Image (tube, rainbow, N blue to C red):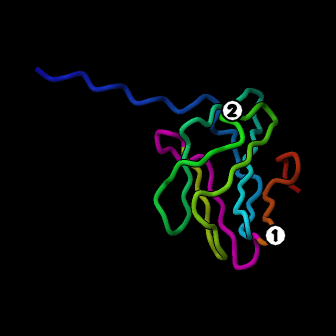
Amino acid sequence: MLAAQPAAAADPAGYQNVRINEVTSSNNDTVELYNAGSAAVSISGWKMSDDSFSPQSFSPSSTTIPAGGFVTFNSPKGLGDSDKLVIYTSDGTVVDRVEWATDKAKPAMARCGGDGAGA
């Protein structure tokens, strides 16, 4: 008799609206995520990686990003010069990625501007 396999958790609704908004790679390596959607998005269990390590859990300031809102977290591993950052759902789906050149994330690399609209 085969045991039933647990169903994989579905990607959270609206995850496609979440973007990496800002990255700092000096002192505290901090990441800011922005939700451009019209509904809150759960980021519980999400992971991040860079060039040098496999996806790892992070501790966000909140496990839900409100519509039009932001969440920050410190990278569990150091982010460096000429690096990249990839955010994954708990199932491993890539949410967003960003790369930067030497010294472009010091003091910070802002990708979308203050409201996520770009500028």
Query: Could you tell me residue 99's position as x and y percent?
Result: 65, 66
- Can you identify the residue that label 2 sits on? 64
Kindly identify the residue that appears in the image at 15 percent across and 23 percent down.
2
Q: Secondary structure at mark 1?
A: loop
- Can you identify the residue that label 1 sits on? 107
- Quadrant of the snapshot with the N terminus: top left
Judging depth in this view, the residue of 13 and 3 nearest the camera is 3
Kindly identify the residue that appears in the image at 59 percent across and 48 percent down.
58
Which contiguous range is marked in magenta? 89-105
**10 Å neighbourhood of mark 2: few (<14), some, or many (≥20)?**
some
* Quadrant of the image occupied by residue 115: top right
Relative to 76, is 110 on the left or the right? right
Asked whether 72 falls inside the magenta stretch, the response is no
Residue at the limit of the structure toward the bottom, as seen here: 102
Judging depth in this view, the residue of 74 and 15 nearest the camera is 74
Q: Relative to 53, is 47 above or below?
A: above
Q: Secondary structure at mark 2?
A: strand
Query: Could you tell me residue 31's position as x and y percent?
Result: 71, 55
Precedes in sequence: disc 1 or disc 2: 2
Query: Could you tell me residue 16's position as x and y percent?
Result: 64, 39
Q: How many marks?
A: 2
